[in-house]
Amino acid sequence: MIIYTNGDSHTAAGEAVNSYCFACDDPNLWYMGRAPHPDNIKVSYGAVLGRIVKAKFMTDAESASSNDRIIRTTKEFLSRPTNDQVIVVIGWSTWEREEWEHQGKTYQINACMGEDWPEEIKERYREWVTNIDMKKKLQEEHDKIWNFHLELQERGIKHLFFNTFESLAGVEDEKDWGGSYLFPYNNDLTYYNWAISKGFSTVNVNSYHFGKHVHYAWAHHLLPYLTEFL
């Protein structure tokens, strides 16, 4: 069995045991690019779940990831042949993020312009950030995730979704996700707000990330919802 996770920095355990989010932030691991830092990912909630249920653990989580990237890379992972049962666990990112392709390279677009972006992407970004309709964007993200849920369901792939920071509250057509999505429309029960409500603190006052003890607690919080898959 494989516990496969995907998401943004919360799933990648950014800053969980050291100050790095991307592996390349560590001068000794520059060659690993935007992958999660190994010290952090090994204490992530996904790694903890893998140890609890004695499953292989694999992840495509990446800090600053958009939901576009999460869906794309999850589909790529699931296209590879395996004899193992795969359980997909996804912590969805914030709704304004997008993935853009330019000259064969993908860029994760969010509220801040990237200094290393080509000028064509920067120009497109200036227009995008000026005109973005957040209500419409939220609905688009909701529908995208719903369609992905239906695809996984049709393929018989067990999956558990949750929101890391923001919920889907405010969409026009709330869906019945069965047991596949934890409280999709409840802001109080996102990963971040759940942790704060339990009295946990972020790794520092300027961070939205939590330490390894919160990943351990969140893994145990998720465990009962995974029971029917095991």
Image: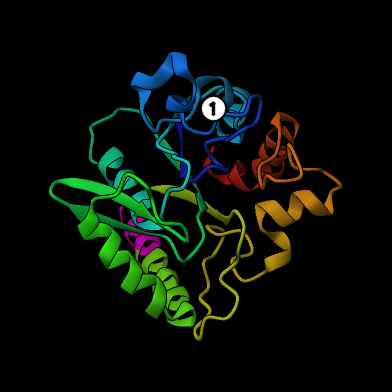
Q: Which residue is drawn at the image coordinates 46% and 57% (left, top)?
A: 112
Q: Is residue 83 magenta?
A: no
Q: Quadrant of the N terminus?
A: top left
Q: Secondary structure at mark 1?
A: helix
Q: 97 or 75, which lies in front? A: 97
Q: Which residue is drawn at the image coordinates 50% and 25% (left, top)?
A: 37
Q: Which residue is drawn at the image coordinates 42% and 75% (left, top)?
A: 137
Where's residue 222, x and y in %?
A: 65, 44
Q: Is residue 154 magenta?
A: yes
Question: Eyeballing the image, is 8 above or below 45?
Answer: below
Q: 7 or 77, which lies in front? A: 7
**In the figure, is residue 222 to the left or right of 149?**
right
- Residue span colored magenta: 148-156
> What residue sits right under mark 1 in the picture?
41
Instruction: Kindly tell me whether residue 28 is visible in this rendering.
Output: yes
Q: Which residue is drawn at the image coordinates 61% and 35% (left, top)?
A: 45
Decide whether the magenta segment is chiefly helix, strand or loop: helix
Q: 31 or 16, which lies in front? A: 31
The residue positioned farthest toward the left in the image shown = 103
The residue positioned farthest toward the bottom in the image shown = 172
Where's residue 97, x and y in %?
A: 42, 60
- Identify the coloring: rainbow
The residue positioned farthest toward the right in the image shown = 199
Where's residue 105, x and y in %?
A: 20, 45
The residue type indicated by label 1 comes to Ile
- Local packing at callout 1 (Cα closer than 10 Å; few below 14, some 14-19, many 20+) is many
Question: Eyeballing the image, is 83 above or below 199?
Answer: above
Where's residue 144, x and y in %?
A: 36, 67
Question: Eyeballing the image, is 212 above or below 62?
Answer: above
> Which quadrant holds residue 209?
top right
